[in-house]
Image (cartoon, grey):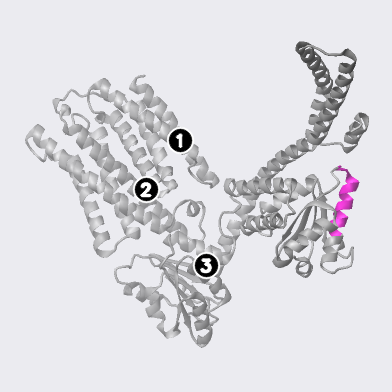
Amino acid sequence: MTSHVYLVLTSILYAVGALHVLLQALTRRRLLTSWTVGATLAGFALHTAGLSQRWTETGQFPAIGLSDGASFLAWAIVLVFLITYMRTRVDVLGLAAYPAAFGLVLIANLTPATRSADPILHSVFLPVHATFAFFGYGALFVAFTAGVLYLIQERELKSRAPRRFYYLVPSLDRCDTLGGRSVEWGFAFLTLAIITGLMWNHSARGRYWTWDAKEWSALVAWAIYVGLILARHRTGWGGRRAAYLGIAGFAAVAFTFVWMNVIAPGPAL
Amino acid sequence: MIVLVGVSYRTAPLEVREALAFPKDRMAEALLKLREEAGLDEAMILSTCNRVELYGRPRASAGDGEAAADATSLVESFLSRFHGRPPGALGEAVYRLSGAEAIRHAFRVAASLESMVVGEPQILGQVKEAYHAAEAAGTLGGTLNALRNRSLAAAKRARTETGIGHNAVSIAHVAVELARKIFGELRDKNVLLVGAGKMSELAARTLVRSGARATVLGGRTFDKASALAAALGGRAAPLEALRGELAAADIVISGTGAPGLVIRHDDVVAARRARKGRHHRPLFLIDIAVPRDIEASVAKLGGVFLYDIDDLRAVAEANLRERMKEAAAAETLIDREVHQFLDWFKARDAVPLVVALRQRAEDIRRLELDKARRRMGPLTAQQEEALDAATTAIVNKLLHSPIVHLKESAQNGHDPQQVSLIRKLLGL
């Protein structure tokens, strides 16, 4: 099978997962059944096979350009979601993770796969830097979702007439803790990604900083997360403000990804 | 064949149910007497505050309507006699079911579809206990045991696959559920009770059971406050300490009979400021007093969640409506399970007849074979084998279609007249 066939099959399985989770949410039952998890694992296995096939086909780590980037990002989000679900059993994260994974794989399917001949892409820094960055994106996506869930649950509770989401979303405390933990993980990966990115810059261009917008937005995201983590640890900060800050940080991260792949594609760096 | 005689909150007032209840310490005795006096092979008694039900399998295995009527009236007169009532005094308060009706009822009771509040969790445990008592007393046999296994499994399925058991429907439980949605774990959370009312106590008990610590504030009735504090394993404090206690509290349940406000906006603002390093921690205020104790404007403060008695009631009612919707799904599920059980049950009913028929045919075959052998003299092994095979084949071929027919008719509902006709025809 070619990597494209793998990708099509993967998107079908993720679509099944997304539809299933949405339907379950509408009927207010348990969101994830063993079937959903099984389909996800199968989809994830196919996805992994597809990515490695793609790597073999092009001889280049499949994280460059919108098509490969979106596919790899979906892979990282599903992986982080599965790990988080296994550890915390917060199934409502699936309401964000499945549609996101499906959307990204769909984008990957619909956009032409780009291949850049830029010699710097043969650097060993590419797989290392990209893996760190995408794991970071995955964890920060979970943090972002936890923040949104916190705000939704807070609004439900404040309304004094809680509705559907009140039952689906875990407690405020749970959302807050989950957000805090995943920000820490995401921040660690983001830091590693920035460091390896700078080293890659230096080895390819002889300069650490190239004044590109994505470097700035990554730095802004990093600064937001530093502030958030310090505030949490030093002053016992949390709750709604932490949720907003987590969402803001993710916006900066998302901008970095979109800038790199959509607005100013072209050779990496 | 199963018969059932019972009273429930639907048919009898509390006084009657109380008078007919079977105390735990007399249960074994009652079961043995029931089996003996009503001529049953198996017996089980379910006795809760909402229902008293006697299940039994009559000794006469023929399942015709007359036998069932006899058995139910025997069970009913046992019920009256055991509780020292004149026979027939129960009249309309009693329902008498038999066969499929009784089985359906047993399934519905276990699944809480017959309960006052659909989906209430206690009934499943009570039914389990009732079967367990019958098992211990030795009055449980194959039929009631099968009913136990299938109805309990169906009840569990109804609970896990539909939402009948979801979400609190009492005000105290709604409050506790809300607290869980805010704090997650309730361990080591501080609950502050302002005033010592019945409903505050109910909610506080559940919170304390989940690991929360209680403090009770008392004003004029300080004795009452310290008594409640002792019952909750917490401490009591005077009402003047409100601001200080408020700063330490996570959950406040206020239910004083005071005519005016007890907890004002300023009190809450000051308390929020006073919690060092924890100002983002949420504060859950429950105002169950009428007139209200807590100034309504505190609900606008960040991290403060205020619910009054009407809010809690509205949530409870919404939850109950949701349960009713889910109950329809549970009804369908239980119906399916009852049908499966009945099919299995009826097929099992046919088994003794089929076995008897086969046995009779085999007896005749052996008898005739022996006679023939005596006339024929010694035979070789091959001849013996051929004779045996030929006679077996004749018997099997002759019996094939009646046996298939018997099993089929049992699946479609046994006709007792047909069964007795077959018995007569075949001399069984």
Q: Given the image, what chain letter belongs to the residue carrying mark 3? A: B
Tell me the amino acid under the disc marked 3.
Thr
Does residue A170 appear to the left or right of B108 in the view shown? left
Up-down: is A57 above or below A78? above
- Distance, label 2 to label 1, CA atoms, is 23 Å
Residue under label 1: A38
Give the distance between the C-alpha atoms of the residues marked 3 and 2, in whole angstroms: 32 Å
Question: Same chain, marks 2 and 1?
Answer: yes
Give the residue drawn at x 54%, y 63%. Answer: B174
Q: Given contact means CB atoms under 8 Å apart, are the residues at marks 1 and 3 in contact?
A: no
Residue B323 seen from this side: yes
Taking the magenta stretch, the answer to whether it contains residue B317 is: no
User: How far from the left and from the top, in percent, is residue B426?
Assistant: 90, 29
Q: Which mark is residue B206?
A: 3
Q: Nearer the viewer, residue B22 or B13?
A: B22
Q: Nearer the viewer, mark 3 or mark 2?
A: 3
* Res B197 quadrant in image: bottom right
> Decide: marks 3, 2 in contact (CB < 8 A)?
no
Q: Which residue position holds label 2?
A: A145
Magenta residues?
Answer: B62-76
Q: Identity of the amino acid at label 1? A: Gly
Residue A113 at least partly seen: no
Q: Is residue A46 left or right of residue B369?
A: left
Mark 2: which amino acid? Thr
Chain letter for the residue marked with disc 1 in the picture: A
Q: Residue furthest bottom?
A: B220
- Residue at image x 40%, y 34%? A102
- The residue furthest front is B378
